Image (cartoon, helix red, strand yellow):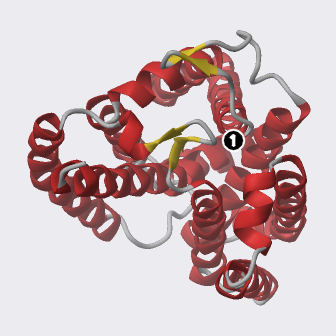
Amino acid sequence: MSEPSMVLPVILALVLGFGVAMYVVLDGFDLGIGILFPFFPDEGERDQIMNSVAPFWDGNETWLVLGGVTLWAAFPKGFAVIMPAVYMPVIVMLLALIFRGVAFEFRWVSKPHHRAWDLSFAAGSALAAFAQGLILGGLLQGFEIRDGQFADRPFHWFTPFSLMCGFALVTGYALLGATWLMMKTEGELARKVREMGVPLLLALLGFIVLVSVWTPLQFARIAERWFSIPNIFFLIQVPVATALLAWLCWRGIRGGRDVLPFASAVGIFLLAFAGLVLSNIPYLVPGAMTIWEAAAHPGSQLFFLVGAAILLPMILAYTVLVFWLFRGKIKAGEGYH
């Protein structure tokens, strides 16, 4: 291979990974508040919860678009294999996100007849998170490819492993949502979510341990990646750092801290994502197609990279600006609607 055809897929894989990581963290906490929504029947608390993410939620989903477009434009062969493999959970996820977004806006204008929109907001959030877990599980467990095309069963993604990934992601997003509300609210609402924090943290850690045991037992290539020498001496830092962040999150929740629980929960998510990447690089389709095999022509990749180099700083700048402008806590009765 020529040098551009070797280097460009690596750069664009980093762009793809960055976009996915940003989406999981940023849209994760506002999906999380939707997952927690049914546990707060009080109307004032529900208004406060939704106002805590009102300036952020639609901008957060920009990262999903960036990730999808990067996969389509930079790795079309991978896109052509991955999409048929997970069509159904992808469609479910997109429909759930649409219903959730519509419910977010319509809830305010339909008061006092807004109960159906409350249900749509909560159900859309939980269903979108669960569908993302199904997609993740379906990709991690792999599928059959023949002549560069998906050739497995339509419901290959419906397995105990992918279902476990779905419940794990719902739990993780709920933790992000709870720690976000600890940071953004005060009073009775903050006290209630703080009580939820430790059980959610322990549940997420349980799922992380389960995935960490399940994947090397089921996939020999992952076991070799993590437990061969000298890899184990470098990769052991990931679970050690995860344990440290979990302890910090627990301390922050129990100690009444505002920012520490959310920051450490984000760190746990990023380390879990890093662990999955380290388990599968250089594969885009785990065990079947590398980033170089999935890549577009170098000219197409270079064209996309120029566009990404222009747009990515703009998206980052917008994200930072919004979070800075709407920093601070949302008090009961305050809002942006």
Residue beneath the point at 43% across and 54% down? 17
**39 left or right, relative to 118:** right
**22 left or right, relative to 224:** left
Pick the residue in front: 180 or 279: 279
Q: Is residue 151 above or below residue 189?
A: above
| Element carrying mark 1 | helix
User: Can residue 185 be seen from the camera position used here?
Assistant: no
Residue beneath the point at 61% across and 80% down? 258
Q: Position of residue 42 (x, y in %)?
A: 75, 44
Q: Which residue is mark 1?
A: 140
Pick the residue in front: 186 or 78: 78
Q: Which picture quadrant has residue 116?
A: top right
User: Can residue 87 be seen from the camera position used here?
Assistant: yes
Pick the residue in front: 195 or 140: 140
Determine crowd level at label 1: few under 14, some 14-19, many 20+ residues with C-alpha closer than 10 A. many
Q: Which picture quadrant has residue 278?
A: bottom right
Q: Is residue 251 above or below residue 194?
A: below
Q: Position of residue 154 (x, y in %)?
A: 70, 9
